[in-house]
């Protein structure tokens, strides 16, 4: 029999969170049918409370079927995100349906801020999960029982639940589900048809906006932050930074870490990384020149730093974002 896939719709949904997975499962079904395996595909159904049509708030509207009885077994339940997810979490009846349906689904998939629905339903307690990079701090704050990882494009958070980063990552996780169900060859064929990577390189950190750490309350520490940001390529050794703040190196390191949230060395590395990112995007200078100008010294040091902090090497980052 075909695998049933329920996509939950609601007003204020992020359209691509719903359409992306639907297209992947539909393409896989067509490929299987072409191979004479009509009953091996997916039966994709968009559902909403009362079967009411719903819109995205940006001009797109969707039709839907009523929510099935939550005790009816389904293969896959997809929880999209979007601005309307706050209203869904506040709807006790709909959340009760999600909890019961999740227990009767073989697997549950959250896309983008759909992770908040999964977390509210208690599906992510004690699990490593991800969501859109702009909402990871909020997810961790509102659901401290969830181990939030801001970098992955998607995660298999448990044997039962998958979480995806945001928007287009619903396509990535759906390709992974097709691969899990039918193998690498079919998933690769679907990815090619949709003109996509089967697995795109790196994590979502490479797409995130620069994250600037909060300003310290103490003026001497703020001045050190400003000095680092003004000249990322300067030496910025601990003794010099401590001297600028009129503190001993040991005391400075402790105070800086308390005020800023990370050690001085890590802060310097973060600022250098963001400076290098901008130069990779905006200039044609060589990686070696950028590495020297931003304080990394050598291209290899910068490469290792980029892989650790951004998830991809500098040349691949430039190809994607220049």
Image (cartoon, rainbow, N blue to C red):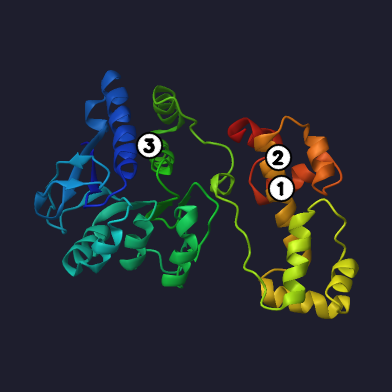
- Mark closer to the observer (3, 2): 2
How crowded is the residue under tag 2: few (<14 C-alpha within 10 Å), some, or many (20+)?
many
The percent coordinates of residue 223 (x first, y second) are 76, 69
State the residue at coordinates (28%, 18%).
34
Compared to residue 176, the image places residue 234 above or below, namely below
State the residue at coordinates (85%, 54%).
234
Compare residues 166 and 248 and report the one nearer the observer.
248
- Mark closer to the observer (3, 1): 1
State the mark number for residue 279: 2
The percent coordinates of residue 267 (x first, y second) are 73, 62
Kind of element beneath mark 3: helix
Q: Which of the 4 image quarters holds residue 18?
A: top left
State the mark number for residue 199: none
Q: Which of the 4 image quarters holds residue 224?
A: bottom right
Kind of element beneath mark 1: helix
Q: In this view, does 278 lie to the left or right of 140?
A: right
Mark 3–mark 1 Cα distance, whole angstroms, equals 39 Å
Image quarter hosting the N terminus: top left
How crowded is the residue under tag 3: few (<14 C-alpha within 10 Å), some, or many (20+)?
many
Q: Is residue 178 left or right of residue 128?
A: left
State the mark number for residue 275: 1
Q: Specify which label sits upstream in the sequence, 3 or 1.
A: 3
State the residue at coordinates (21%, 52%).
11
Residue 189 shows up from this direction = yes
The residue labelled by disc 3 is 178
Asked if marks 1 and 2 touch (Cβ < 8 Å), the reply is: yes
Asked if marks 3 and 2 touch (Cβ < 8 Å), the reply is: no
Q: Which of the 4 image quarters holds residue 89?
A: bottom left
Compared to residue 33, the image places residue 318 above or below, namely below
Q: In this view, does 17 lie to the left or right of 265?
A: left
Mark 3–mark 2 Cα distance, whole angstroms, equals 39 Å
Asked if marks 3 and 1 touch (Cβ < 8 Å), the reply is: no
């Amino acid at each position: 029999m075909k695998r049933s896939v329920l996509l939950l719709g609601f007003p204020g949904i992020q359209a691509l969170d719903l359409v992306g997975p639907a297209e992947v499962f539909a393409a896989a079904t067509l490929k299987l049918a072409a191979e004479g395996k009509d009953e091996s595909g997916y039966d994709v159904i968009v559902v909403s409370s009362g079967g009411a049509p719903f819109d995205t708030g940006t001009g797109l509207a969707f039709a839907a079927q009523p929510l099935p009885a939550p005790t009816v077994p389904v293969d896959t339940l997809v929880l999209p995100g979007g601005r309307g997810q706050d209203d869904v979490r506040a709807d006790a009846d709909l959340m009760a349906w999600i909890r019961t349906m999740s227990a009767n689904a073989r697997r549950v998939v959250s896309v983008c801020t759909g992770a908040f629905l999964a977390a509210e339903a208690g599906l992510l307690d004690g699990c490593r999960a991800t969501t859109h990079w702009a909402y990871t701090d909020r997810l961790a704050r509102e659901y401290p029982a969830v181990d939030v990882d801001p970098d992955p494009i998607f995660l298999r958070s448990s044997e039962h639940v998958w979480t995806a980063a945001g928007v287009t990552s619903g396509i990535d996780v759906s390709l992974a589900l097709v691969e899990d169900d039918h193998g690498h060859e079919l998933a690769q064929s679907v990815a090619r048809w949709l003109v996509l990577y089967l697995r795109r390189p790196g994590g979502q950190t490479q797409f995130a906006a620069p994250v600037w750490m909060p300003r310290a309350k103490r003026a001497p520490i703020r001045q050190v932050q400003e000095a680092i940001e003004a000249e990322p390529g300067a030496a910025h050794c601990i003794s010099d930074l401590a001297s600028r703040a009129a503190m001993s190196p040991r005391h400075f390191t402790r105070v800086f870490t308390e005020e800023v949230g990370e050690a001085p060395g890590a802060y310097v590395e973060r600022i250098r990384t963001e400076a290098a990112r901008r130069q990779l995007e905006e200039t044609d200078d060589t990686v070696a020149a950028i590495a020297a100008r931003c304080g990394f010294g050598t291209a290899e040091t910068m490469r290792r730093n980029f892989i650790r902090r951004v998830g991809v090497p500098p040349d691949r980052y430039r190809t994607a974002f220049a």
